Amino acid sequence: MESYQPSVLLIYTGGTIGMIENPETGALENFSLEQLQKQIPELQKFSFRIDAHQFDPPIDSSDMNPEVWRELVRIISEHYDEYTGFVILHGTDTMAFTASALSFMLEGLRKPVILTGSQLPIGVLRTDGKENLLTSIEIATACHPNGRPIVPEVCIFFENHLMRGNRTTKMNAENFNAFRSFNYPVLASAGIHIKYNHVQIHIQTEYKMLKPHYLLDTNIAILKLFPGIQPNVVDAILGTKGLKAVVLETYGSGNAPRQEWLLKRLHDACERGIVIVNVTQCSAGTVEMERYETGYRLMQAGVVSGYDSTTESAVTKLMFLLGHDYSPAEVRKRMGRPLAGEITV
Ligand code: ASP
């Protein structure tokens, strides 16, 4: 029998993982992938092919945008057949947005796309980057005995946990344990062994080719409610020129104040064809608008449920659906159906 040789494409976009301290100024500066490889000699211990693609210049993930997501999709789809899996080194700040966007843009994905980064730069003694990178490579090349990848999903691996990308949120700016998937179990835990949670991993049952998508519409806003929110703030957001959709961050299980001015403005915006999706401000749990009158009134105004979606996932899913030029009614319908395991319905 032919022996199977895995391979991985390492895509370095930037972020803390690839930074080094300038000895003179003490500031963190980007350094090249070559230098990164020098800092992690362990990479050479992998007995298979690791190729690299570097963004030039590397970008802090605060500068991440849909143009870069398209570039990532292009790189992955152009090299799709050449590698067992892909590892993307990315700044942590917006990693959950990128992972969510890629999960929608890479339709029919059957290979691992693992995003990782670090809280401390690779050059620092206590860095978490080494461990994150090495384990991500291992996961990206892990296959069943029949050669099929174990995790054919877009994921984030961070501090011993593999999570579905579109379920994650960065929830800590200090700890190594920076990401959480509050509403979906982890897909794997890394200790002495990497233990895969096979039942939670999405497997494509029918054969599909990878279908890369590039169209995204960014005419979206996030409206976060707070006690005392004023009509002029809501007007400014809902009256934004060209606005097509709003992620409405509500309280608890999807509740909002019952003030008539607010409900009327939301209702009028829905009537104008703006899609308003209700996502909870809570880290965990789901929107159930029928539970309290405060949620029920939103439903009557035309707001649709985002279920247990993260804000990152709701924003990027809306960009993706609006990019397809679906009617507002169709976008509303599709927000209620999982595209890539991003909601539980
Ligand atoms: N500002 C950095 C970034 O997101 C932080 C990090 O990488 O953790 O690119």
Image: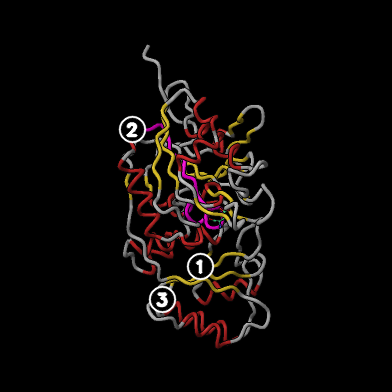
**Label 1 CA crowd tier, 10 Å (few <14, some 14–19, many 20+):** many
Q: How is the image coloured?
A: secondary structure
User: Which residue type does callout 3 highlight?
Assistant: Leu
Q: Do the residues labelled 2 and 1 touch (CB within 8 Å)?
A: no
Q: In this view, does 191 lie to the left or right of 278?
A: right
Residue marked by disc 2: 82
User: Disc 3 to disc 1, how far (Cα)?
Assistant: 13 Å
Mark earlier in primary sequence (3, 2):
2
Residue marked by disc 3: 243
Mark earlier in primary sequence (3, 1):
3
Secondary structure type for disc 3: loop
Chain part drawn in magenta: 82-100
Residue that appears at 32% across and 48% down? 74
Q: Are marks 3 and 1 in contact (CB under 8 Å)?
A: no
Q: Quadrant of ligand 1?
A: bottom right
Q: Can residue 344 be seen in this view?
A: no
Position of residue 231 measured from the top left corner of the image (x, y, whole percent) = 57, 87
Q: Which of 244 and 137 is in front in this view?
A: 137
Mark earlier in primary sequence (2, 1):
2
